Amino acid sequence: MRVSYRWLQELLPALQAPPAEVADLLTNVGLEVEGIEVFGAGLESILVAEVKRIEPHPEREKLRLVTVDRGGEEQRVVCGAGNVPGPGGLVALAPLGTTLPAVGMTLTPRKIGGILSEGMICSEVEMGLAEASEGILILPTGIAKPGTPLADALPVQDTIFEVGVTPNRPDALSHVGVARDLAALLAIELCLPPVGEPQRTADAELSRLVAIDNRDRERCPRYGARAVLDVKIGPSPLWMQYRLFSLGIRPISNVVDVTNLLLLEWGQPMHAFDLDRVRGGRIVVRRAAAGEPFTTLDGVERKLDADDLVIGDAEGPTALAGVMGGAVSEIHDGTERVLLECAYFTPRGVRRTSRRQGLSSDSSFRFERGTDWGDVPVVLDRAANLLGELCGGAVVPGAIIDDGELPPIPTITLRSSRLDALLGVAVPFDEALAILARLGLEVTSTRGEGTAAVATVRGASWRPDIAGEHDLIEEVARIRGLDAIPTVLPPIVPQKPRISGKLERTLTDLASQLGLSEALTYAFVSPAELAALNAPPAVVSLLNPLTEERSVMRTSLLPGLLESLRRARRRGERAVRLFTTGTLFLPPLTARTTGASQAARPQLDSDLGVIPEQRPAFAAILAGPRPAYLERPETDVYDAKGLALELVERVTQQPAEVRLLTAPDAASHLHPRGKAEVVVAGRPVGVLGPLHPEVVDALDLDGAAFVVELDLVALEQIEARTPKYRPIPRLPAVTRDVSLEVGEQLLAGDLAAAIRAAAGELCESVELIDRFTGKSLPDGTSSLTYRLTYRDPKAATDPDHARTLTDKEVDKCQTSVNAAAEKLGAKLRA
């Protein structure tokens, strides 16, 4: 919606705020100003000039030499326009040095055909006041004296606001509606546009000129008409043309321009018919016949639907109601009698027709949101009187208003106590009622005092969005100012300081680099999903959930990821590599540490002093086949282990390890033979493993899946080490492999730790490189092969004094290793 600052000043004579301040005020009351444009910028130096003489150009046949008076000083201009007025006519002169922004040119002295031109006589296009023109601008005689700046003689300069109007504010699609908000905000008087009196009336009766037959009062609850006779079609006054053009509407003729002016003024779409083309002298409001042909004003022939509402005459449709007129009865140069239409069409019907026909217009845009049915008579009167004034027509007395069941205007009870409670601040009740009155709402009665005060307020036909007490309270808050409502921080659970989101962003980048895709999941889940995962019961329940599947706040990230897995598999996608980060809404820490049952835990909806712990977390899920070039075809727990270790080690810059979880109640949603915890510097930071078969069945996952869950709070508490440079060793290392036969009860990690401790300080690393099971081994045993790397410790700190180890030294270490392994029950294999 484009809004004119000059027009607002006419509706609000007391408005003194500059345009920039008005833009801020409109934005503060919810009418966001998205842009500001100065119409007619750069025309300050354009002058009104009087033509004195016109002479032919001595060298160029199509050019003439025009001498003009620019206010006590004559100068000669070379002009090629064919419509230069004779002596005494007024034109717009751009003197030398003028910059015309519309054409991007600064006027300098130049010879045209050997004659020096001392300026330019301008057209409207060259000044940016129109899209097209047939020659130079000829000003009305007597409009101003020669030498007067054009901006003082004509309203060629204005500030235009580009206002973003929300769908619930159809009243703001008009200058009257925007001015009403400013008047309420600034407590100044709103002067509505004058209806005026007809300069000439016709000796005729409207009912004898045309009959109105409204056959669909459900879709058209109000239809109004007036007539003006003996009109003369011509251009509108310049002020009207420039106003329309500045607001994005192309001037057409005085009749059409009046209807467009009232569209912008009152937000009320109108249509003008050539009364002589209304066949049979009847206007019929009806539904179209299925497939009925109709040609709209844009020249497109359309096939109508039985649900489309049309304005017809005795022979066929003449307009698509609320959307666009037809070519049958449009205004043309020979029109002498005009029938004005102003109606209220129900928004749903217009919306359906507009979408079905793929046709949107300024009228449909407003009707779809709801126009003001109450101002139909006023707009008709003003339009008829303007036509009488601008077209020389005779106004037919009276109007035809055909009413059906109009939308009701609500009567609303406003309570002071509710007002204060909803806004969170004490608002003087008298001040609130004064704001509503300035918005045009009628306060019909009041009773009580203080917080017990109650008022009855009647809505308005131009505000269909005001239907209840909460709407009135919103209006008070909007006009009074949202900044007048104090900010109160909600209670939160104290936590150690953390750089919000930094670790989440780091893990997101790392997981993406490792080939995973991020899944954006809901924080709302179902209690059944949490129960299937043995996750902590939900502590936050939604009072008005969209569905049962979104009724509580999550205590685990897995429900969302597993839902994505389930959907992928149902659509034939087996390979899934997904991760997500988010907040878990866990029971209060005190309740968890004391082992309180869910029934004993206070809930948010029963005790507002208890707040869940909001704990950031990371989760990933791996399932399906690996790439075909890898040896093992299916994803297994080692993929999850590798992912977890890689993520944690990159974040902390410290070595991480995986420990088997043996407690039955630890991570019970994971398979008991594959669940493990991720440990860094002796602290657990997460868990990993295959999902328990019961979870797979309960959630209908159609196959195994492996998960990684990381506690971001625990990760943040581990100080990340700064990587240090280590020089490349100059001396070779000594490597020894040892194969050990072990039983299933002996963990490979425990065995590696024992080997590392027994190998002593010369051992640089211990790495498990192979696991073998087969017929050559007893049942329940396997062969584990470790590679030990030996090197002088000084190689990393003092390479200049490092030495090569001898076989004797290494053999001694290996003997200790063998002995330590045998103590754990491992047997050395040849």
Image (tube, grey):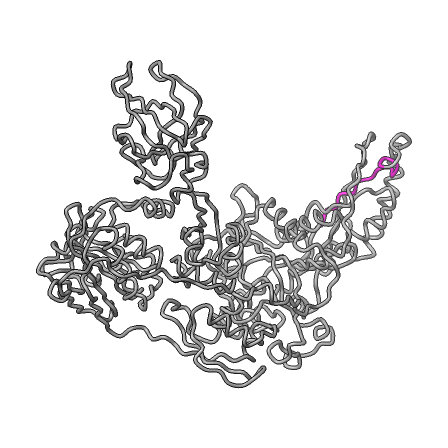
Q: Residue at x 15, y 51 (%)?
A: 336
Image height of 82 relative to 110, above or below: below
Residue at the farthest right position: 801
Residue range highlighted in magenta: 784-796
Q: Is residue 150 left or right of residue 686?
A: left
Front residue (pair 148, 93): 148
Residue at the farthest bottom position: 448
The picture places residue 156, in percent across and down from the top left corner, at 39, 42
The picture places residue 291, in percent across and down from the top left corner, at 15, 57
Q: Is residue 315 left or right of residue 654?
A: left
Is residue 795 in the magenta section? Answer: yes
Q: How many marks can you see?
A: 0
Image height of 569 relative to 405, above or below: above
Is residue 554 in the magenta section? Answer: no
The picture places residue 224, in percent across and down from the top left corner, at 23, 65
Q: Is residue 774 visible?
A: no
Q: Is residue 748 visible?
A: yes
Quadrant in the picture for residue 737: top right
Which quarter of the figure is the C terminus placed in? top right
Front residue (pair 530, 370): 370
